[in-house]
Image (cartoon, rainbow, N blue to C red):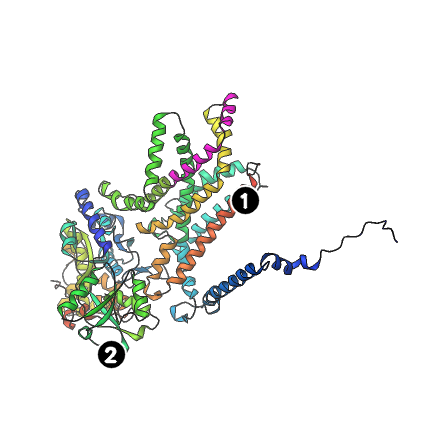
């Protein structure tokens, strides 16, 4: 009989409990029912994905300049390729496209600065993003100053217009929404009733109606010869509409903050704005990140409705391209491209919101 | 085609009229246009052959050429146009409110529109109408041979009613197969649900290209309804009305006289008094409209005559391949006719 004086060394786990085989057995084939479902699922994937991949990649045509380069057996990405510039910049004059690129490069730079935790001067960069950047964007995109040619808004379009509409909508809707949410909880009867009426009115009409009114009815009420740029009309419509939604999301967050927080702040001698700005809102907004981003994502997709007032956003310019008689019959390719672009942006927003949630996590999550 | 959308449009237009009878924009459109430096032209948000942006982002089409002709007449520069894309519902409001000065957006000339909306139709640049497309293999050459045919048609449009009227008037039977959208209608035709597809002839050509075998189908020569499409201006500014009207007439007259964008410069030295008057060599016929004497020369040299514009955008030089048909000149069996320049 031997006596073990040393600890027995670690041995690897039994072969049938680790590795891909074990994972498969545990998760996919753990019983007859699960096995059947797994096989069924694989079969479904097979019959769905095979034709899709064949259409989109294997039989697809990638290179060329006209419809003659398309074999029509699979997707014709030549169409998207030939129109890519237009899908991104709309009808923006070719020689001025650097202005759009510069605007978005600056914007991306500012956002990256704000998003990367190590970089300093966050407060100043935030100020520049909110105040300086919109002015810069206006001068660059519209022009008319500093020797830049004016590019009228009816030449704007594509992804650029979608982004401009979405960013303006978001930047405008958030502060107005916060104000409305605070106003709705106010004790002051006039402020409160104004906010209630505003929110309920804008939430009660569809966005398409708002845009429609702005484009069809508004011009008739204006004095002769005066016309507000249709892009401005869209900005105002979208911002007011979304701010009502935003207000309700934020009010939800405000409701969730225990009364004691505000009372404690009051006991410390803080006034209304300090209580709200330093105690209540930071907690409420943090909690409402999923709701706020949800509203932003839906706003981003709602921008496609500007199509009905004749603005060529990403979807609108794709549809306009589909009616070029030289490119008839490539609707599927165009729509797949538009869907893909929208997905990329919405998914990025969603990932960023999850990152923010983790970063601002202070134990309130359950 | 008066579909549901257009009924909507009539409603809103009627509302617009009551609200905005006073909104007849300032009378001196030509002066404002000259000041602005560009013609504000309302076009569609994409209709094959009539107005759509090409790969370079430039607007192209038969309707777009009307805008370019007006710009050429006014400024001597066909590119001095500000295109504003309008959908069917907002097009008349945009014109009434002065957002655009010419509406060149495949708009059918009807009594209601001409008389109650405060608008004037300045002419017809395309005579459209309901036609039939049929499989070539069936060997049908006239719509009178369609007795008993299954007909694919889009629901809620007057096409449906017009087709029923046509078959009843000619004492023929037919079996309507109704679809909701034009894509579905094409799908039904392609799947063999019907023998015949019916729609406006300009649309038929665009639908035909989207078939997997475009050459397997033919568009029958008969057109069974009247859809004259043309440019529209505001009522109450006769000078501007004349500018638009005669820009169109200049293109038609040029074709009739055989002047094209290629030979217009040679034609300047012509002996033919008609041509000399049109090109401003003899007399100043632009004066009455507030234009220079060579207004028509600029149109022809930069936009071309009507025939060139037609072939380039919807005719044989384009993918749409629409025959001239009734859109040929009156001298060639069609009904396109322009008053003389004199």
Q: A142 left or right of A259?
A: left
Image coordinates of residue B158 in percent, x first then y, are 20, 60
- In magenta stretch: residue A255: yes
Secondary structure beneath dot 1 equals helix
Identify the residue at the far right of this view.
A1
Q: Quadrant of the N terminus of chain A?
A: bottom right
Q: Quadrant of residue B201?
A: bottom left
| Helix, strand or loop status at disc 2 | loop
Q: Which residue carries the number 2 mark?
A: B139
Measuring from the top left, give residue A331's x and y in whole percent: 37, 62
User: Given this view, does label 2 or label 1 mark the residue nearer the observer?
Assistant: 2
- Residue of label 1: A355
Res. A103 in view: yes
Percent from the top left, x then y, of residue A322? 35, 61
Q: Are marks 2 and 1 on the same chain?
A: no
Pointer 2 with pointer 1, Cβ within 8 A: no
Query: Few, some or many C-alpha atoms within 10 Å of disc 1 (few <14, some 14-19, many ≥20)?
Result: few
Q: Is residue A254 above or below residue B276?
A: above
Q: Marks 2 and 1, Cα distance to the nearest angstrom?
A: 67 Å
Residue at (31, 51) in percent of width and height: A308
Left or right of residue A309, residue A337 in this image: right
């Amino acid at each position: 009989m031997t006596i073990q004086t040393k600890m027995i060394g670690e041995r690897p786990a039994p072969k049938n409990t680790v590795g891909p085989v074990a994972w498969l057995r545990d998760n996919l084939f753990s019983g007859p029912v699960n096995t059947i479902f797994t096989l069924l699922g694989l079969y479904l994937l097979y019959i769905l994905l095979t034709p899709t991949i064949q259409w989109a990649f294997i039989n697809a045509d990638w290179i060329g300049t006209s419809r003659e380069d398309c074999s029509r057996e699979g997707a014709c990405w030549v169409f998207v390729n030939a129109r890519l510039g237009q899908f991104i910049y709309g009808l923006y004059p070719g020689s001025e496209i650097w202005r759009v690129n510069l605007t978005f490069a600056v914007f991306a730079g500012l956002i990256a600065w704000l998003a990367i935790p190590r970089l300093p001067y966050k407060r100043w960069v935030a100020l520049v993003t909110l105040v300086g950047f919109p002015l810069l964007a206006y001068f660059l995109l519209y022009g008319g100053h500093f020797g830049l040619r004016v590019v009228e808004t009816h030449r704007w379009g594509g992804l650029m217009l979608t982004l401009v509409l979405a960013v303006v909508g978001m930047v405008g809707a958030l502060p107005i929404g916060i104000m409305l949410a605070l106003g709705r909880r106010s004790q002051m009867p006039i402020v409160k009733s104004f906010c209630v009426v505003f929110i309920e009115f804008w939430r009660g009409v569809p966005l398409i109606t708002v845009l429609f009114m702005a484009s069809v009815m508004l011009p008739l009420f204006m004095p002769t010869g005066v016309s507000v740029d249709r892009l401005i009309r869209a900005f105002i419509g979208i911002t007011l509409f979304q701010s009502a939604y935003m207000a309700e999301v934020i009010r939800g967050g405000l409701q969730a903050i225990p009364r004691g927080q505000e009372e404690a702040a009051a006991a410390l001698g803080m006034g209304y704005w300090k209580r709200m700005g330093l105690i209540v809102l930071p907690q409420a907004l943090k909690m409402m990140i999923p709701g706020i981003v949800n509203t932003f994502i839906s706003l981003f997709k709602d921008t496609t409705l500007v199509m009905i007032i004749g603005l060529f956003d990403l979807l609108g310019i794709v549809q306009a391209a589909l009616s070029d008689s030289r490119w008839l019959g490539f609707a599927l390719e165009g729509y797949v491209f538009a869907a893909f672009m929208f997905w990329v942006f919405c998914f990025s927003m969603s990932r960023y919101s999850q990152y923010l949630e983790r970063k601002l996590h202070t134990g309130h999550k359950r | 085609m008066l579909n549901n959308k257009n009924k909507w449009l009539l409603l809103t237009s009627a509302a617009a009229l009551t609200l905005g009878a006073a909104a007849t924009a300032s009378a001196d459109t030509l002066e404002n246009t000259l000041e602005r430096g560009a013609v504000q032209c309302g076009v569609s948000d994409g209709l094959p052959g009539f107005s759509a942006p090409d790969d370079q982002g430039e607007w192209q089409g038969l309707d777009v050429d009307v805008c370019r002709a007006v710009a050429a007449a006014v400024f001597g520069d066909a590119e001095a146009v500000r295109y504003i894309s309008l959908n069917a519902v907002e097009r008349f409001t945009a014109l009434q409110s002065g957002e655009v000065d010419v509406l060149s957006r495949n708009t059918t000339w009807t009594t209601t529109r001409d008389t109650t909306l405060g608008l004037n139709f300045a002419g017809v640049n395309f005579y459209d109408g309901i036609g039939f497309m049929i499989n070539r293999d069936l060997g049908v050459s006239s719509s009178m041979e369609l007795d008993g045919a299954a007909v694919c048609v889009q629901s809620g449009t007057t096409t449906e009613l017009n087709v029923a009227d046509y078959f009843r008037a000619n004492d023929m039977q037919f079996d309507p197969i109704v679809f909701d959208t034009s894509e579905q209608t094409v799908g039904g035709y392609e799947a063999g649900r019907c023998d015949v597809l019916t729609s406006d002839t300009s649309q038929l050509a665009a639908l035909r290209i989207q078939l997997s075998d475009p050459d397997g189908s033919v568009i029958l020569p008969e057109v069974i309804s009247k859809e004259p499409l043309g440019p529209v201006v505001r009522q109450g500014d006769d000078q501007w009305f004349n500018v638009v009207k005669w820009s169109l007439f200049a293109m038609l007259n040029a074709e009739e006289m055989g002047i094209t964008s290629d030979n217009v410069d040679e034609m300047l030295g012509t002996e033919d008094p008609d041509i000399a008057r049109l090109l401003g060599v003899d007399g100043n016929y632009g004066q009455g409209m507030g234009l220079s004497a060579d207004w028509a020369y600029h149109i022809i040299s930069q936009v071309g005559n009507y025939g060139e514009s037609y072939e380039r955008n919807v005719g044989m030089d384009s993918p749409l391949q629409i025959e001239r048909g009734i859109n040929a000149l009156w001298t060639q069996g069609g009904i396109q006719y322009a008053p003389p320049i004199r």
